[in-house]
Structures are given as C-alpha cells and as structure tokens.
Image: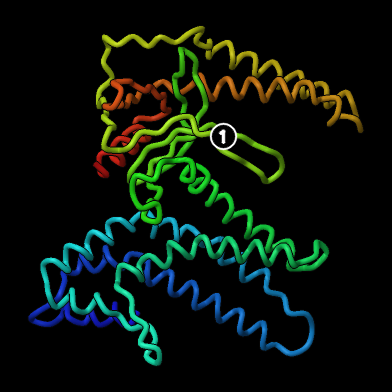
Amino acid sequence: MQYKKAIHATLTTSQPVIREEEENTIFFKIDELFDLHTAFLSDLKTIVSHEGGDVLIGEPFRRLAEMFDLYSAFLHNYKNAIETVKKCSANNPQFKKIVSTIVLNLQTEQSLTLEDLLHKPVARVQINALVFNDLLRETPNAHPDHQPLRQAQKIIQMFLNQFNVVNQRLPIESNRNLRRMVRNSFIVELVDGHRKLRHLFLFNDVIACAKYKALGRDRIDYELKWFIPLKDVSIYEEADPAVELKESSPANISQVKRNLRSVRDQLAMEVANSGSGAFRSGDKYRRKLADLESQLVLATPNLVLRLGNKANNKTITFFLSSDFERTQWMDSILSLK
C-alpha cells in the first residue's frame, strides 16, 4: 500500500510517473481487498484476545468468504493491470525504477516487482481454500464454528469449481497462473440437432464449454465438452437467415407450458387430498414438474449466437434468452482479442 501511496503522490506534481486512469487500472480493488483483510485480522485478534469462554472464529471466516466477489473483480482486471504496468515501465524510467525493486522486508531486504505483488491476490484464492478445508476438517460437527466454516467453504468451493475444474482440463498454451475467468453462465447449445444445457466459460486466452454434473449434496463437477483458443474464435455478429438451424424435433413451448399448468394442478390436488403423507404422495408429480421445467429452460431461448473455430472451420450455435445477454458475450469475447 505504501508504494501505491507513493505513486499516487506524484499525480499532483509537475512530473507524475503515471496517469490517474493508469493508476486506477493497476491498483483496481487493491484498497478494498486491503480493507477486507485488515478487518478480518482485527476481528480475529479481538476474538483470540478475549478472556474466558470458547474462542469462536467461524463467523469472521464466513464474512470473509461472503466478500469473495472482490477477488473475482480483481481477477477479471488482472490482465489489464499487468499490461498497464508493462506499458508504463516501458514509457517512464522513473516508474520502472519504483516498481522493479519493491522491498517487502527491511530486515531481510526481500524484494519483489509490482507484477509479483499483483499476483499475490491470485495465489491467495487457492491458499484461502486450503485454509478453509483444514479448519473444517479439524472442527467437530457439533462445534459452533462448524456451520459458519461449512458455509464459508461452500462459497469458496463454488467459486473455485467454476474456475479450476475447467481450467485444469484446458491446455497450457500460456502461463496458467495468469489465466483468469472473464465471464461464465449457463447457455443452450445446439448439438447434432438437439438443444443441450451447457456451462460456457470465457477465460482471457480460451473459451470452454462444459456439461454441469451434480454429484450429490454440495458436490458438483464439470465434463469438458470442447475448448477453443481465443485466437481461433470468430463471431458471427448477425444471424445469417440463409443458414438453416437444423434442429431435430423442436419442443412445442405452448404445449410444454400447458403440461406444466396441468401437472401443477394435479400436484396441488394430490397434496390437498393426502393430508400428512402429502410430500411423499406428490413425488411422481414433482418429478414430472422438474422434467417439464427442464424442457422449458432448453426450449425458451431463441436468440442465436454463433461462434466459429478458425482451426477447423466449424460453427457452434448457441441460443440465448435476451439480446442483452448475447451482446454481453460478444463484447466480452471481442474485448480480449
């Protein structure tokens, strides 16, 4: 933080080492992350120093996990921050001198570059996950800290699953430590004429499509279906009306909605007539309801987004629910190319 302050102080001089917008890009979310961990450390010190009674640390860890969106925002900007550091170092020798030998420990004279320091929050994500796992493993189920630690671990694990499970199955064409996730969401893909629910991940160097798999309570996995390096991705910004969508047996949305209403009515009648055994007796209708809702999720999106793979000249077709969502995906991909 002291180096950020030193660089910031030059903005008001006649010879600033960088512009204000460059400073904002390099140190994006650094203040918030610093404040988050300062408050977390203060909470722990207060709890540990309290005399008498049990030392309960679960809540501070849960609050830390709930603020993990800050890490996500930092990771999304990480590439821009590194590129800005390199550009400013090339353009300003004074800035390069400041950021090339940052002394971390005056006693050992340990020093790192600013790029090294900016990578620390990236590494911290993995370290936090390991710490939460260790704490939870050593905390008995009946202990008051178990529930908040469990909640914290679940929040972080969901974040990591979206990033790491897919990332680990992708090729290492660039430094994986620098790979960051830019955007992800569920999406409908047209595969061999059939609509399939997929999870699409956009990284700063590759786009990947995976099948979401629930393995049980609080456990998920992703089956990687395909990936394309961003350098090989092309976008068809307008749907070509001459290109036929070869969709086999498209669902009748109106009929699916009518079936949904009918099953909901049947479920309500079954519950009303079954008294204390209502939940079990309605299982058949709940399964039907879940199946019809899944059909509707697949059938409803109708806005087409096509991506091309320059390496093999193949085209991938997606269906989205809104023009806003389609535009967001297109803009995110184009901004990385």
Residue 247 image position (x, y, % from top left): 44, 10
Write the residue at 79% across / 21% down.
284
Side (left or right) of 181 relative to 56: left
Instruction: Examine the rendered structure and indicate whether residue 99 appears above or below residue 315.
Output: below
On screen, residue 288 versus residue 243, left or right, reads right
Residue visible at 33% across and 83% down in the picture: 103
Q: Position of residue 49 (x, y in %)?
A: 67, 88
Residue furthest out toward the bottom: 107
SS at mark 1 in the image:
strand
Place residue 240 in its image quadrant.
top left
Residue 127: image x %, image y %? 53, 65
**What residue is drawn where x is 27% and y is 33%?**
232
Q: Where does the N terminus fall, quadrant-wise?
A: bottom left
Q: Amino acid at mark 1?
A: Tyr
Residue 142 place in picture, x, y as percent:
83, 64
* Depth order, front residue of 183/139: 139
With respect to residue 309, does 175 lie above or below? below
Residue, far right = 276
Which quadrant: the C terminus?
top left
257 sits to left or right of 103:
right
The residue labelled by disc 1 is: 212
For the point 40% across and 92% down, which residue is it?
107
Q: Classify 253 as above or below 120.
A: above
